[in-house]
Image (cartoon, grey):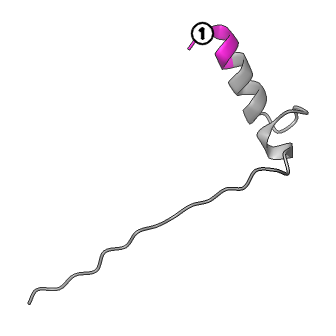
Amino acid sequence: MNADDLDALDALLDGTQPHGIARRDDLTVRTTRTTWIARRP
């Protein structure tokens, strides 16, 4: 990454910036968790 990329990333991750990700209302966070359960026959 170059310096411009890092500056853009810092601005997106900063909650006080007007274009920060935390201020956007069109984004959602999705997570999944996979659990495997097994037993011996």
Q: Looking at the picture, which amino acid does disc 1 mark?
A: Asn
Up the image or down, 8 lies above or below 33; here it is above
Q: Which residue is drawn at 72% across and 17% down?
A: 7
Segment colored magenta: 1-6
Q: Residue extending furthest left? A: 41
Up the image or down, 41 lies above or below 19; here it is below
Q: Residue at x 76, y 32 (%)?
A: 12
Q: Residue at x 28, y 80 (%)?
A: 37
Circle 1 sits in a helix, a strand or a loop, which is it? loop
Up the image or down, 15 lies above or below 27; here it is above
Q: Residue extending furthest right? A: 18
Within 10 angstroms of label 1, few (less than 14), some, or many (20 or more) residues? few
Q: Residue at x 81, y 36 (%)?
A: 20
User: Where residue 22 appears, x then y in whole percent?
Assistant: 80, 45
User: Where residue 28 appears, x then y in whole percent?
Assistant: 72, 55
> In the visual, does 40 lie left or right of 14?
left
Label 1 sits on residue: 2
Q: Is residue 16 magenta?
A: no
> In the visual, does 16 lie left or right of 29?
right
Viewer-proximal residue among 26 and 17 = 26
Up the image or down, 38 lies above or below 24; here it is below
Q: Residue extending furthest bottom? A: 41
> What is the number of callouts on the image?
1
Residue 11 occupies quadrant: top right
Please identify the quadrant where the N terminus is shown: top right
Please identify the quadrant where the C terminus is shown: bottom left
SS majority, magenta: helix
Q: Residue extending furthest front? A: 26
